[in-house]
Amino acid sequence: MTLQRTLVIGDIHSGLRALKDLLVRAKVTREDTLIFLGDYIDAWSDAVATVDFLLELRKTHNCIFLRGNHDELCYEWLTEGRDNPTWFMHGGRATAESYAKADDRTKKTHISFYESLKNYHLNEDNKLFLHAGFTHLKGIDHEYFTKSFYWDRTLWELALSLNPDLDKNHERYPQRLVHYEEIYIGHTPVTRMGKTTPQNGANVWNIDTGAAFKGPLTALDIHTKEFWQSDPVHTYYPGEKGRNGK
């Protein structure tokens, strides 16, 4: 009997070589569901090639692509043509240089890909997947600002600061955390905590293991919590700095 898994994959940040290695290490098959948490680009030099690969992957595999803040920044740059110095400083320059070598047809195809990204995915088991977080106490359906889905960092901050001994039924238990069985995010690298493996706080799992910096790229089985990792992504790109400073 073929085992059907749901694998959630952290922020790639143009690390295509690491992604290919990761899919091999995780022994991904066409029976698996792959949920990508966003930030497909910005850091390493393979921005265009990464999106091209994902477009091909979804033809053969069941893929769910979520929207990351870097994807939205790139989309705005591609469609509006405005320079964004802050974006350039945080990985956008490598992406812009990658797209400078792409033809118009490729750019149009990629714009369609960025437009098709989902802000969140809620599965049949009431497990929520989104790039960053949400702020409304009543959950995602009540969120005032959709940008929170790919920019918010307070959900992860809340999960980390929560007293693990506090019962869910306690009056002080954070209402944001009671609506979903589990919540899977990226966006805030766990390398900021000195970690390079998926981290859990309350019912929130953070799968961003720092691929844009000096960490690996990670895929996690949401049922068993087994995970697989590439080598540190920077080792696949010798001579490049990613988002590790100038």
Image (cartoon, rainbow, N blue to C red):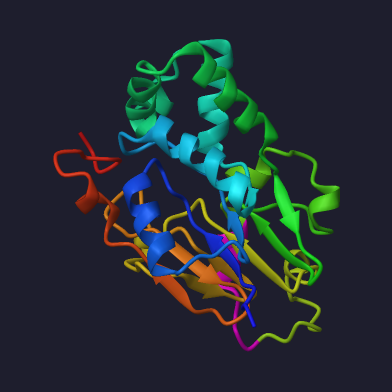
Direction from residue 134 to residue 224 in the image, left or right: left
Direction from residue 245 to residue 25 in the image, left or right: right
Look at the picture and state if 138 lies above or below 159.
above
Depth check, front residue: 168 or 119: 119
The x, y position of residue 140, in whole percent, is 79, 53
Magenta stretch: includes residue 157: yes
The x, y position of residue 23, in whole percent, is 43, 60
Q: Residue at x 79, y 69 (%)?
A: 126
- Per the rendered image, the range of residues in magenta is 155-165
Look at the picture and state if 26 lies above or below 34.
below
Direction from residue 172 to residue 43 in the image, left or right: left
The x, y position of residue 102, in whole percent, is 41, 18
Direction from residue 94 to residue 142 in the image, left or right: right
Magenta stretch: includes residue 28: no
| Position of the C terminus by quadrant | top left
Instruction: Give the main secondary structure of the magenta stretch.
Output: helix
Q: Residue at x 81, y 78 (%)?
A: 171
Residue 232 seen from this side: yes
Q: Residue at x 68, y 85 (%)?
A: 166
